[in-house]
Image (cartoon, rainbow, N blue to C red):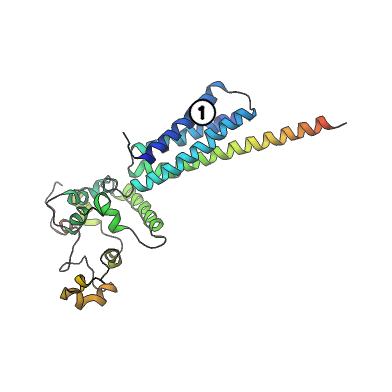
Amino acid sequence: MKTLLVIASVLTLLALALMVWSLLQPTPLPVMVAMSAGQVLGTAALGAYIYVVVKDLFRLRRERAEQDKP
Amino acid sequence: MPTDPLTVLSLGLAGASALLLVWYLLWRPALTRATKVVLLFGIGVLPIGTALTGNYAGFEATKARHFCGSCHVMTPYKDDSEDPKSLSLAARHARNALFGEENCYACHADYGMFGTIKTKAGGMRHIYEYIFHYKDMSLAEAREKIHIRKPFLNSTCMHCHSTENPGWNAIKEHKSLIDRVRSDAVSCASEGCHGPSHPFSKQPWTGPR
């Protein structure tokens, strides 16, 4: 789980770097790369984060249910 | 250094997001509720804000003449637009404040409901063509080979020059050709009317080879 969050963080940093590159140098290549690869990396990172959080919520719910058992 | 407020906002959001992520990567805290909230901002809210503002700033940047001129094959067109002495249709429109720095986009954009999307999709094709076919081409060769993909539609001109104005209709050539102009049978930018828009591209090459 933690590894996935680290990967998501690194992917987000890469996506941000591409977006910042396109903002500082608005020429065709950076703008295209930011709007394609940048968006894909950012979306993948967000997907990984949501997966980890949802999985963690289910784990917490399962643990609570086990604790509540008589 | 960027001064456009949207670009500055986008850079600020990216910086804030990067700070949160670097903090997480350095400290690797346990996955508590607080960590989840921090990461929600670091991976979700702030990067989405960066993408939204950055994409808008990117779309705006693609309208600028220096963006079009950043592909070397467009340099003569950009230089002509920026030449205060040029009498070409493109240069005269560039000197009009309504077109200004965005004169390439103003004349080559598709108008209508999905015009912006169609224009941007066409622009992607231009970049593909440039990277795979024209990147290493000389200016002389490019000028021979690069042509506008579709005939230039008069509807683009009519976006401003409506053909309804009495002053426009007072010109006898306009009056006699009005139906043919409106139906694109005669181009406003044709030789003998107001064109060609980039006359240097129709003359023999005199620049470096």
Q: Position of residue B178 (x, y in %)?
A: 24, 75
Looking at this view, name the residue that lies furthest to the top.
B27
Q: Residue at x 25, y 73 (%)?
A: B181
Dot 1 falls on which chain?
A: B
Q: Residue at x 46, y 37 (%)?
A: A15
- The residue pinned by badge 1 equals B20
- Quadrant placement of the C terminus of chain A: top right
Q: Position of residue B73 (x, y in %)?
A: 24, 49
Is residue B24 toward the left or the right of residue B121 in the image?
right
Q: Residue at x 63, y 35 (%)?
A: A52
Query: To which quarter of the image does residue B110 belong?
Result: bottom left
Q: Is residue B166 above or below residue B98?
A: below
Q: Nearer the viewer, residue B153 or B148?
A: B153
SS for dot 1 = helix
Q: Amino acid at mark 1?
A: Leu
Is residue B131 toward the left or the right of residue B91 in the image?
right
Query: To which quarter of the image does residue B1 belong?
Result: top left
Q: Is residue B193 above or below residue A45?
A: below
Q: Residue at x 53, y 22 (%)?
A: B26
- Quadrant placement of the N terminus of chain A: top right
Q: Position of residue B31 (x, y in %)?
A: 63, 27
